């Protein structure tokens, strides 16, 4: 059962990562990138690394996507 | 057009060649792995019981590799400095759209809860998963909620400056006291008995250092968030 969950999460991460690089809009790919981070949070929790999972949830999914979104806003402002 | 195609085919063939090379090297490495490997991490985890900290990752990050953590904090400080310098010429943007009533009310209710959760993550960093970095970023996300919902909310630069310098100086001072007392930078000079393992006051200097890291990361990340959102265009 746990192996099935791990396999599904792996395949889901790969599909979401591929979907995020073929998007036309940058906002969509940033949101899908957050999905990749969430999938890896699930994997880190299953593989008994709660510290890394917390860091990934807070920094990888939260702050880095905020910084990406703000950089996008600055790029649009300069154009 | 043909030039571009040449580039793409050559890069594709180079990519496949390198992938095959990496895969062969990996398969050779996997076959040659001995049954029981003892890495540097395993040895550090065995030493964990000397420090009386129930979260083994914390004792590795803060104590055995405390000097690296000091470097990480310096990197974060430089990042905060860079963002501040890069956006310092830009004028403060006046957001025309007033934020929603619902957002304001939710921020009022959620802000203390998120702040308390961040402080809990920092203070219990040596007992449960979490620590200074994660807790500091959670505090910064509570500040983010205030920044996006109240237009006239502004962090006081003097307080942030004071907190950041206090945290940085006290980290180095604790390390130097360890150097003087135990001949080792960041030596654990406070009592850290194994019998206190699992209590809030255990592990000697490790919880104190995590609280310092939490203050530093929280103030730096709050400043980064505020600069990025307020100084647009």
Image (spheres, grey):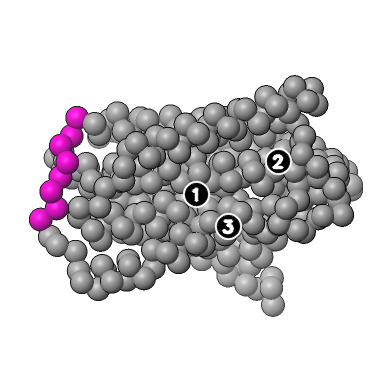
Q: Are marks 3 and 2 on the same chain?
A: yes
Badge 1: residue crowd in 10 Å (few <14, some 14–19, many ≥20): many
The residue carrying mark 2 is: B205
The residue carrying mark 1 is: B136
Whole-angstrom CA distance, mark 3 to mark 2, is 17 Å
Q: Is residue A10 visible?
A: no
The residue carrying mark 3 is: B121
Residue B15 place in picture, x, y as percent? 51, 37
Label 2, secondary structure: give it: loop
What secondary structure is the stretch in magenta mostly built from?
loop
Residue lying at 69% horizontally and 77% vertically, measured from the top left: A1
Q: Which residues are magenta?
A: B89-96
Q: Is residue B81 visible?
A: yes
Residue lying at 56% horizontally and 41% vertically, measured from the top left: B213
Residue B63 place in picture, x, y as percent? 72, 38
Whole-angstrom CA distance, mark 1 to mark 2, is 19 Å
Above or below, B195 against B68 in this view is below
Verify whether residue B92 appears in magenta. yes
Whole-angstrom CA distance, mark 3 to mark 1, is 9 Å
- Circle 3/circle 2 CB separation < 8 Å: no
Residue lying at 62% horizontally and 27% vertically, measured from the top left: B173
Q: Residue furthest bottom?
A: A1
Residue A52 place in picture, x, y as percent? 61, 53
């Amino acid at each position: 059962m746990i192996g099935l969950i791990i396999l599904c999460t792996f395949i889901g991460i790969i599909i979401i990562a591929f979907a995020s690089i073929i998007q036309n809009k940058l906002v969509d790919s940033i949101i899908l990138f957050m999905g990749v981070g969430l999938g890896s949070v699930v994997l880190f929790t299953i593989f008994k690394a709660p510290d890394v999972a917390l860091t990934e949830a807070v920094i990888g999914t939260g702050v880095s996507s905020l910084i990406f979104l703000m950089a996008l806003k600055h790029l649009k402002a300069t154009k | 057009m043909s030039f571009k195609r040449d580039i793409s085919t050559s890069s594709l063939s180079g990519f496949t060649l390198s992938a095959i090379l990496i895969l062969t090297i990996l398969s050779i490495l996997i076959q040659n792995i001995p049954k029981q490997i003892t890495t540097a991490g395993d040895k550090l985890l065995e030493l964990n019981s000397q420090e009386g900290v129930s979260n083994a990752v914390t004792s590795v990050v803060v104590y055995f590799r405390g000097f690296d953590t000091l470097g990480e904090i310096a990197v974060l400080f430089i990042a905060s400095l860079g963002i501040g310098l890069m956006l310092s010429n830009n004028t403060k943007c006046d957001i025309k759209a007033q934020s929603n009533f619902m957002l304001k009310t939710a921020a009022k209710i959620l802000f203390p809860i998120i702040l308390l959760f961040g402080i809990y993550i920092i203070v219990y960093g040596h007992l449960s998963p979490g620590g200074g970095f994660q807790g500091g970023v959670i505090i910064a996300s509570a500040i983010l909620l205030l920044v996006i919902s109240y237009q006239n909310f502004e962090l006081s630069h003097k307080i942030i400056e004071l907190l950041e310098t206090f945290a940085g100086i006290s980290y180095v001072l604790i390390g130097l006291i360890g150097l003087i007392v135990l001949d080792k930078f960041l030596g654990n000079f406070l009592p850290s008995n194994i019998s206190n393992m699992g209590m809030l006051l255990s592990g000697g200097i490790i919880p104190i250092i995590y609280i310092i890291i939490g203050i530093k990361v929280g103030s730096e990340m709050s400043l980064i968030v505020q600069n990025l959102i307020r100084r647009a265009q």
